[in-house]
Amino acid sequence: MPFTFRTREIHTVAVIGSGQIGPDIALFFAQALEPYGARVMVHDIAQEALDKGRERIEAKLDKAAQKRGKPEKAEKTKALFTWTTDAQALAEADWIVEAASETLGIKQQIFAELDKLAKPGALLTSNSSHLEPERIFEPVADKSRCANVHFFFPADRNLVVEVISAEATSPSAELWVREALELLGKLPVRVDGRYGYALNPLYEGVLMEAILCVEDGLASPKQVDAVAQKVLGFGAGPFTVANLCGANPIAVEGLENLHERIQPWFRVPNSLREKAAASEAWEAAAKDETVEVDETTTQQVGERLLGAYFTIAAEILDAGIVDMGEFEQAVQLAFDCTPPLALINQVGVERAEFVARQFLERAGMDATAVPAGIRVHAKYQEGFETPVVFTELRDDVALVQIRRPKVLNALNEEVFAQLDEVFTALRDNSAVKAVVLTGFGTRAFVAGADIPELAALLEEGDPKQAAVEKCRRMQKPLLLIENLGKPVVAALNGLALGGGSELAMACTARIGVTGMVVGQPEPNLGLIPGAGGTQRLPRLVGFEAAWPILRTAKPIDANRAKEIGYLEEVVAPTEVRDRALDLARKLAAGEAEPVRRVRKEALEPTPAPEAELGHLSTRIDQLLQEAVLEGNAKPLAEGLEVEYDRFGECFLTTDGRIGLRNFLENGPKAAATFEHK
């Protein structure tokens, strides 16, 4: 059974190169495609390289199987692989990823052969980390099917993939690659084809400055790594990362070309050349080693690393080769660090401009040539606002995506504010006829609200009033969506819990995916829904279906959600976005069957039947029942005010404090011990 997305079927993915990163790319595809039964081929001209790659991947699979107690899964994944030196076997592949040497001549030679071998229509992609796609794919006759896909170390686990089109790449092929990678579990980031792309210049620039700090006698490599972890928030310092992924030779060539073709501040430190020539690793701390760094050294090295980090990031954004929000998220996830714009906001734009000037001075450049992004913000003393809600036009339908992958797209104040801004613009844009709202990835539409933000309300002078005001802020974009004057279809790409379910109910219609769940788990936290759940759910599916969902905090699956009228359809994950776009267009044109909407008039509520609450708080259940019964007896606008009041009351209860504290201290799976007061 192939991986089928739109009109393209992937029976076999081929990865060329069994060296540093190729086997890990192959492992990603094998694990992602395992549910579909698609196969993965690894090709190399050297049998020794194939054997080493196979040993590494099978060792990873065995280790994971031992940890999880699922040896059969490892064997099933191993069986998907083919390891071959036979280039003719590549003719079977539907998607080929070249991951050989980062050398233009070798890549061009490979693609010249693939132009003859690959079957018509097969995707031809290169895992280049620097080279422009126009140069790589020069030998290919049909360049419309070619694109770069730059995976990051370790490729099987790192979420980020830069997607770089050639000038002749078909827009539909580029879009397919991006969306297919997202469906398979990656965070694809679209980048223009400038040398080095968006992320590598940032890492290599920080590595360069780290090496220069050592050469200038400020600190040892171990100490610089420790400062990078403290000041830049790196999970591992630049020297440790260079050792892990064998970055020295590529960094030498990269920095040379970046110096000549991008900015003169890039340069190759002498010790980097020496390490690369001798194939030597940097001195780096052992796994559990503690590295002592005094305050003066931390400040001196930290200022230099910040200067490089901020200046290079701002130049990349000024160049316009990548979306600001996508860049910020990609840096955070690819390098496991505090992203540059968030860090500028933390240290202040004036300090950011100061360290950027120092960086330029050390590079022998005009210190006033600070990238405009920093300079302008420093002038007006304004921080950066980076998007987490993204909009992409698909003809006359806007596709809006909430993208917070680290927290399963959870809603916080920032998301609500950006939803309000985005939907206000869409309401006023006459060219947009309808909207599809979705989340990033395949795990969650929205996993709920940001719990630390809710817990912080307990520390307010008047917790109830603070909670009520928060409800009103949350409800503002939901009311905007509900009354947009244009259809809004929620493409529920994964679980929709708490605020995610409440957001979906504000939309005109909802399409879900197989395997997803819907629920209002707030009673587990000692709370009731606060973004409309007690009011919209009964008005959408009826009281009989709504009561157990609201009172027991137990989610329902997609089939049950369709049965009670919450979902219009349940489709495969590969189909949900396109189906939602199609329904949105039909609703806008008046060509779709009527969909079930949230009723806004007053209803006659049905009292709650008996329910097994288990460990849940009877005091919170009492507040929930009051919100449902009193609120739904009024028009929706007034009913929401009733919900706000009872939600606020939760923050005055003992159980509200117990539930939130339990979540923060013990996690979502630990049941709170409520006192029912």
Image (cartoon, grey):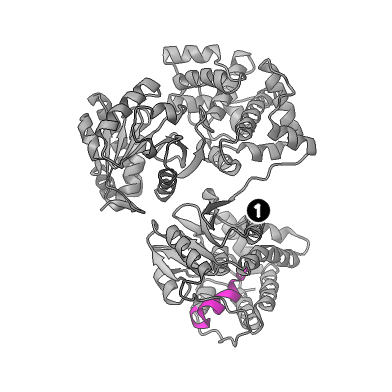
Q: Which residue is mark 1?
A: 414
Kind of residue indicated by mark 1: Glu
Magenta stretch contains residue 540: yes
Residue 13 sits in quarter: top left
Q: Is residue 168 left or right of residue 120?
A: right
Q: Is residue 107 left or right of residue 502?
A: left
**Residue sitting at 55 percent across and 87 percent down?**
606
Please report the bounds of the magenta region as a residue range: 527-545
Within 10 Å of the Cα at label 1, are there few (<14), some (14-19), or many (20+) other Cα atoms? some
Q: Is residue 429 above or below residue 342?
A: below
Magenta stretch contains residue 408: no
Q: Is residue 51 above or below residue 58?
A: above
Residue 433 sits in quarter: bottom right
Q: Is residue 487 left or right of residue 650?
A: left
Query: Of residues 596 and 537, which is closer to you in this image?
Result: 596
What type of secondary structure mainly makes up the magenta span?
helix
Q: Which image quadrant: the C terminus?
A: bottom right
Query: Of residues 6 and 158, which is closer to you in this image?
Result: 6
Query: Of residues 221 and 600, which is closer to you in this image?
Result: 600
Q: Is residue 31 left or right of residue 158?
A: left
